[in-house]
Amino acid sequence: MAQALRFLSPPATSPTLPKLSTLAPPLFPLPSLPSRRRSLGLRVSASSAPPPHLSILPSDDGSAAIDVDAVTEADLKENGFRSTRRTKLVCTIGPATCSAEQLEALAVGGMNVARVNMCHGTREWHRQVIQQVRQLNEEKGFAVAVMMDTEGSEIHMGDLGGAASAKAEDGEIWTFSVRASNDPLPERTITVNYDGFAEDVRVGDDLLVDGGMVRFEVIEKIGPDVKCRCNDPGLLLPRANLTFWRNGRLVQERNAMLPTISSKDWLDIDFAISEGVDFIAVSFVKSAEVITHLKSYIAARCRDNEISVIAKIESVDSLRNLEDIIRASDGAMVARGDMGAQIPLEEVPSAQQKVVMLCRQLNKPVIVASQLLESMIEYPTPTRAEVADVSEAVKQRADALMLSGESAMGQYPEKALNVLRSVSLRIERWWREEKPLEAMELPDIASSFSGKISEEICNSAATMANNLEVDAVFVFTRTGDMASLLSRCRPDCPVFAFTSSTSIRRRLNLQWGLIPFRLSLSDDMESNLNRTFSLLKARGMIQSGDLIIALSDTLQSIQVMNVP
Ligand SMILES: Nc1ncnc2c1ncn2[C@@H]1O[C@H](COP(=O)(O)OP(=O)(O)O)[C@@H](O)[C@H]1O
Ligand SMILES: C=C(OP(=O)(O)O)C(=O)O
């Protein structure tokens, strides 16, 4: 274990290195480092005696030594998760994936975050899903985070009288009705959740279901019923979102009057706080104020502020106020489904790229969502165009990709996840091999002054990591901030992030390239390092001789060493 200490920066010129935690300057001068080959050649022989402060304690009588730095069985069990894929995967949980076995299959298949959409299902149903995810983490050592997505004040269809879906064919006449009725609905009739619907639409308007997946034209209004002809056929899903367009423009006034967070959403938010979810995603955000308001509501109710708020970017207003919204949030989702109903479809790709870049600049995780593998709701293989879409999001280095209907109610949820995983891995590798310079380009960032030192350390560490082709970066982080700043640089090697908090571990699991572990960290950096070496060796993720860089937010330091 002592070997590592010989390689700490600054370069070991003295045989008696001070204890890491007592090294005087908070920020070490960056060492002028030998090449990777040479530093590997500097390995210290195993006979070097450990410094006296190391916690390897040979007993006087020669009986079993107690190695307090060694990782315990409990640590190993808690930290079972071991993928080095950089792009994180979010799965929407629905009827196709809500059993314990199905959730475990998704976790094994690479799910980093389970999303529950409060637009569907009851709170009791969601509670069971959340509890099963928690149980999976406790029993199998995963760090799957839970994201609750609010319904928002959107206009949407009813639940199709219990049917999983319905097919609308070209030229068929369907009725959209605000009539509240407990009786079975007549054939081709759908309820709408917004009472003013029949008053607001006009004959000739286009009615888009699910962002345009199915399109109707309004042909007649009869009291609470609106008769429509299907012009673009497709699959109608329960509670799908509705928008209406007039003369080629979105009719938006009604949505603009509705609150971003409805009274039902507030109840769902209270539910999310009581269930201890990790993320709350807010639908139809229009301005930064609503995010600030929600964050202070959570802060007043939630110990240690353990819930991060994700702004869904899907409306014209959210694009207009993008920077303020992202600054106020803890992350963003490019919700392409609804976005595609609010802005022309051909503008969605550039909006996606803009949101992803801005999030990276501002150091906020970003999720690219919706229709990534839409055809896999019905078919076991994706289209080539879908694979290209997934690849593009991976190349943009979005933090995460999200499955919606594919995992919630599709026929092939595990296969869809497998496609996301294998395409991500392949494109990440290609990107590392082909585009190393472009890959390291850092966007400018306007960080707060207090984060400036950490930011510079992380930028330098990521550059060093790539230049030296190190095997891994280790980051010891109490708040998670330093791990985030490192993730933002998108370095080539895996980043192992160690934190004492289970909640921070789960939330780091949304961020690009971070492989988060929970360990009770001490103030003694040597001890922390030794335990993490022991943990990662046991997990087969590092080996003796590997060159690594270690960072710590308490020491604000960069150290380069070989794994002993
Ligand atoms: N908890 C649930 N219960 C039943 N069906 C669900 C649930 N979650 C999602 N779904 C189904 O999966 C589809 C896609 O999920 P999602 O994208 O989250 O919803 P939407 O597109 O309605 O906003 C939904 O339209 C719905 O049919
Ligand atoms: C993710 C989205 O939101 P929801 O599933 O809530 O409609 C979307 O619109 O792309």
Image (cartoon, rainbow, N blue to C red):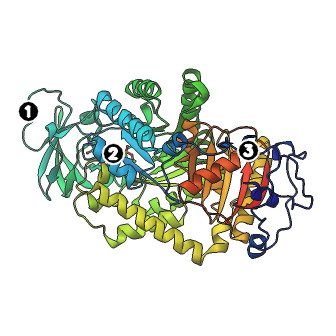
Q: Are marks 1 and 2 in contact (CB under 8 Å)?
A: no
Q: Residues within 10 Å of mark 2 (few under 14, many from 20)?
A: many
**Residue named by callout 1:** 184
Q: Nearer the viewer, residue 494 or 400?
A: 494
**Residue named by callout 3:** 58
Q: Amino acid at mark 2?
A: Leu
- Image height of 328 relative to 487, above or below: above
Q: Are marks 3 and 1 in contact (CB under 8 Å)?
A: no
Locate residue 356, reporting x and y percent.
55, 56
Question: Image quadrant of residue 547?
Answer: bottom right
Q: Residues within 10 Å of mark 3 (few under 14, many from 20)?
A: few
Identity of the residue furthest to the right in this view: 14
Which residue is drawn at the image coordinates 58% and 72% (left, top)?
A: 432
Lateral position of residue 353 relative to residue 246, left or right: right
Q: Nearer the viewer, residue 130 or 55?
A: 55
Q: CA distance from mark 3 to mark 2?
A: 46 Å
Q: Amino acid at mark 1?
A: Pro
